Image: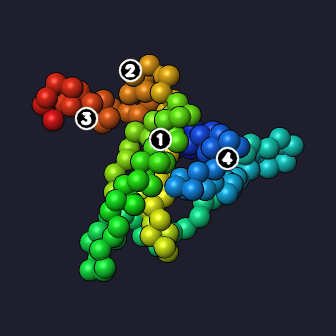
Amino acid sequence: MQGFCKNELAILETLRREAPHPNILPYLGCAVMDVGVAGSGEGDLRVVSIVMEKYKSTLAERCEKKQPPLDVDTCIAEVSAALTCLNGKNLCHNDDHLHDVMLKDDETAVLVNLTRAWPRVLPWRRALRWNGASTRRRAAARTTGLG
């Protein structure tokens, strides 16, 4: 958990510092807990959660509801702008799907969940090791045509 959280926090801090993008979930901070031994005089802080804005629904949930049609062209343009912003900072989201896009009240699309985001300059095999065995199996299936 800490590995995923540490990577995501580093990316969120970078995005916040380098001008936030309107279609990437804004990072507000994180909650920490001291897990050090009481009375030892030394603290051991651990991140217990990342604090972000809350939105009404995911894109997947919105597509299931019987509501007026969503402006698909605008939604695609907003998600594309968020991914382009990440790409411009040499980052890949690596997990973009309908559940990783949230909608604001005005139905503006916002890209969320940067736990699998990784620098593009990182060698492909190392990124797969970091993402775990299930990711390696999916990637192997895609590259071999067995997926």
Secondary structure under badge 3?
helix
Does 48 sit left or right of 75 as displayed?
right
Q: Position of residue 64 (x, y in %)?
A: 26, 72
How crowded pointer 4 is (Cα within 10 Å; few <14, some 14-19, many 20+) is rated as: few
> In the image, which disc is placed on residue 84?
1
Q: Which mark is residue 138?
A: 3
Which is closer to the viewer, label 4 or label 2?
A: 4
As drawn, which residue projects farthest toward the left? 146
- Dot 1 amino acid type: Thr
CA–CA distance in space, label 4 to label 3: 34 Å
Q: Is residue 106 above or below residue 13?
A: below
Is residue 83 in view? yes
**38 or 102: nearer the eye?**
102
Badge 2, how many Cα within 10 Å: few under 14, some, many 20+?
A: few
| 24 with respect to 36 (left or right) | left
Q: Secondary structure at mark 1?
A: helix
Instruction: Establish if 94 lies above or below 128.
Output: below
Which residue appears farthest toward the bottom when viewing the image?
67
Q: Amino acid at mark 4?
A: Ala
**Residue 27 sits in which quadrant?**
bottom right
Of label 2 and label 3, which has the lower sequence position? 2
Dot 2 corresponds to which residue?
Answer: 125
